[in-house]
């Protein structure tokens, strides 16, 4: 799939009176795409409820099963087209859609509406999908919402296979296009196997949906959560989608278009690299103090992009993906294949695998029977794993089995409260390793064991943790959230995380100091630490080892170059003695001004 169209000229002429504008959203898959808008937003209300005569009921049922067969054929064909282009684990998402085509509840609900209420097939499917969609969206559970989107995708696929060509919503454009839709949907992502979808922009959607996973796997620039998109972007508009910056420019002026066309021409000549190349010497303060930066990733494509950009080592690999794709626990073979691919891409550099870290809001039935009253403070992280040791042991076994010669596997335990939890996980680790040795499974690679510091109790009991841990991983955003008793996703509380809080910095300093005294590595992670209003103070507090998303590295490098270590240490000392966050704002502003000057 090409990233940029061969012909950026809109297939539909945009009137001169239509002024250009910018919209912002949440990046799902980074990248740049130029092309014309093609809208796909199937409205289920189009399938009007209507009755059919008794003599047509059998025909409606036959149409239903014929459309189901055609939908399965399309999914099988799509799976074949994507084989080898995306990880095998991600292709299983399409198997989930095939399973919905055979789902007994879905089939019986549609058939009952046709048989008992003489409802037309189109109306019956629309009603069943809408009912499921409404129920799932009332539940504050991201996994259930994801399943609602999957079922809606399947229903729309079946409905579209029932349409006559003249009844289709909009003809496919002749050239490459940028898809604009209400939400990220697998059924809308692919035209001729995805060969002509240059980028995706949606009004709704999130980072973890199945469609988002496939978009990242295929390297399709994708932006979600764009308010006002469908109201303002029309079919045929010319857009510049910068999914790395998080902006879509609709009908930009000729100057802006010319700039992006030059970038495209330079890329075609090979004059501009597709990824920014980083190396170990790239991250220094203004006075030359070296800071180590490794990548933070959550799927194999992110690891591949980090490796291609020259980022050495994976300081944090989040292992939740395989557990969110299917209802069943991933098999040992699939876990081994996935972790082995990550290690292979890391090319001998160490990889820190964080063990499964989910709470009851994810709706994983083999871990939680239902949603708890307060999921974030319930059976999460280490607690959930210790309650379900079979899940823990399978993951540990997979990680140990891929620890072959020349690899360095680092295992980090999430959501630890005190040393007792860490010891229990380590006991399971040693038992699994002994079982593997008895079974003559070689463990030739280096394996180390650490703890994620994100709870206040773990931070205060860090010296005890260091007696059991080979390393520490400080989850800066989570630690800040729990120390400040504020949800970082809350719209009205987000400002609290834009700058560092004195209590958070003092807590971090104590953790870093304890790690230095014990001779242990302490890596600070999470996107929040990369903010130019936060990073100088964290460096000044003593942090020299970071694990960050590759998309933040450009900002991190500029921020580091805008201050000296001496200034950062002095600022951290002042913040550490401040009484409240408001007292540190003048210092923050001075670093932000220096950052702006550096850019």
Image: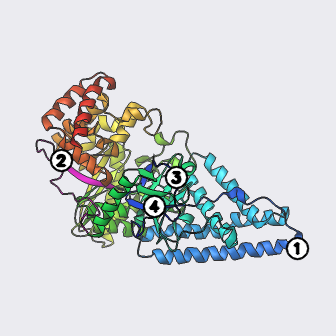
- Mark 3–mark 4 Cα distance, whole angstroms, equals 12 Å
Tell me the CA gap for discs 4 and 2: 31 Å
Question: Where is mark 3, residue-wise?
Answer: 205
User: In the figure, is residue 193 to the left or right of 349?
Assistant: right
Front position in the image: 155 or 328 = 155
| Residue count near mark 1 (Cα–Cα under 10 Å), binned few <14, some 14–19, many ≥20 | few
Q: Residue at x 32, y 42 (%)?
A: 419
Task: Indicate which label's residue lies in the foreground, 3 or 4.
Answer: 3
The mark found on residue 55 in the picture is: 1
**Residue at the outermost left position:** 287
Along the polypeptide, which appears first: circle 2 or circle 1? 1
User: What predominant SS class does the magenta segment belong to?
Assistant: loop
Helix, strand or loop at disc 2? loop
Sequence order check, earlier mark of 4 and 1: 1
Q: Nearer the viewer, residue 132 or 406?
A: 132
Category of crowding for the residue at label 4, using alpha-carbon neighbours closer than 10 angstroms: few (below 14), some (14–19), many (at least 20): many
Image vertical order of residue 450 relative to residue 272, above or below: above
Residue span colored magenta = 270-296
**Quadrant in which the N terminus is drawn:** bottom left
Closest to the camera, between mark 3 and mark 2, is 3
> Is tag 4's residue or tag 2's residue first in the polypeptide sequence?
4
Query: Is 295 colored magenta in this rendering?
Result: yes
Q: Does the residue at mark 3 contact the one at mark 1 (Cβ under 8 Å)?
A: no
Query: Which residue is situated farthest in the right direction here?
Result: 54
Q: Which residue is depicted at the point 39% across and 35% down?
A: 482
Residue 366 in percent (x, y) is at: 53, 56
Give the quadrant of residue 219.
Answer: bottom left
- Residue at position x 54%, y 46% in the image: 228
User: Along the polypeptide, which appears first: circle 3 or circle 4?
Assistant: 3
Task: From the image, tell me which residue sits under label 4.
Answer: 213
């Amino acid at each position: 799939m090409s990233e940029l169209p061969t012909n950026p000229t809109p297939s539909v002429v945009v009137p001169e009176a239509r002024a250009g504008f910018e919209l912002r959203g949440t990046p799902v898959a980074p990248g740049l795409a130029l092309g014309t808008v093609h809208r796909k937003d199937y409205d289920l209300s189009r399938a009007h409820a209507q009755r059919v005569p008794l003599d047509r009921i059998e025909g409606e049922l036959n149409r239903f099963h014929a459309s189901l067969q055609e939908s399965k054929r399309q999914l099988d064909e799509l799976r074949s087209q994507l084989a080898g282009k995306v990880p095998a684990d991600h292709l299983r998402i399409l198997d989930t859609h095939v399973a919905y085509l055979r789902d007994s509840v879905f089939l019986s609900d549609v058939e009952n509406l046709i048989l008992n209420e003489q409802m037309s097939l189109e109306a019956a499917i629309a009603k069943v999908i809408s009912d499921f969609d409404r129920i799932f969206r009332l539940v504050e559970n991201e996994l259930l919402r994801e399943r609602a989107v999957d079922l809606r995708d399947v229903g729309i696929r079946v409905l579209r296979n029932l349409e006559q060509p003249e009844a289709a919503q909009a003809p496919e454009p002749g050239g490459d296009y940028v898809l604009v839709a209400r939400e990220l949907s697998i059924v809308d992502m692919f035209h001729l196997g995805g060969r002509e979808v240059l980028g995706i922009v949606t009004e709704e959607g999130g980072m973890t949906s199945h469609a988002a996973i496939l978009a990242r796997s295929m390297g399709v620039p994708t932006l979600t959560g764009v308010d006002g998109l469908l109201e303002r972007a029309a079919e045929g508009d010319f857009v510049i989608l910068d999914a790395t910056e998080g902006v879509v420019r609709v009908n930009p002026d000729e100057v802006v278009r010319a700039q992006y066309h030059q970038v495209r021409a330079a890329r075609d000549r090979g004059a501009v690299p597709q990824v920014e190349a980083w190396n170990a010497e790239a991250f220094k303060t203004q006075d030359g103090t070296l800071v180590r930066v490794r990548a933070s990733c959550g799927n194999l494509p992110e690891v591949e992009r980090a490796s291609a950009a020259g980022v050495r080592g994976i300081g944090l690999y989040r292992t939740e993906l395989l557990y969110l794709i299917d209802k069943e626990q991933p098999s040992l073979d699939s876990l081994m294949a996935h972790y082995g691919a990550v290690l292979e891409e890391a090319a001998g550099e160490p990889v820190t695998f964080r063990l499964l870290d989910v709470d009851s809001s994810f709706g994983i039935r083999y871990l939680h029977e239902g949603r708890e009253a307060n999921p974030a403070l319930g059976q999460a992280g280490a607690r959930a794993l210790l309650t379900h040791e079979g899940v823990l042991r399978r993951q540990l076994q997979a990680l140990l089995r891929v620890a072959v010669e020349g690899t360095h596997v680092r295992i980090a335990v999430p959501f630890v409260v005190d040393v007792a939890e860490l010891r229990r996980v380590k006991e399971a680790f040693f038992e699994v390793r002994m079982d593997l040795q008895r079974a003559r499974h070689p463990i030739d690679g280096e394996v180390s064991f650490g703890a994620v510091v994100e709870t206040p109790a773990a931070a205060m009991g860090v010296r005890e943790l260091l007696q059991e841990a080979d390393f520490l991983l400080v989850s800066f955003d989570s630690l800040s959230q729990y120390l400040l008793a504020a949800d970082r996703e809350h719209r009205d509380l987000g400002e609290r995380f834009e700058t560092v809080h004195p209590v958070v910095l003092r807590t971090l300093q104590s953790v870093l100091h304890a790690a230095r005294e014990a001779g242990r590595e302490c890596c600070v992670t999470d996107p929040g630490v990369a903010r130019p209003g936060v990073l100088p103070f964290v460096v000044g507090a003593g942090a020299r080892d970071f694990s960050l998303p590759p998309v933040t590295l450009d900002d991190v490098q500029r921020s580091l170059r805008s201050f000296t270590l001496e200034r950062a240490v002095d600022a951290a000392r002042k913040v550490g003695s401040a009484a409240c966050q408001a007292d540190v704002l003048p210092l923050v502003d001075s670093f932000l001004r220096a950052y702006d000057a550096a850019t």
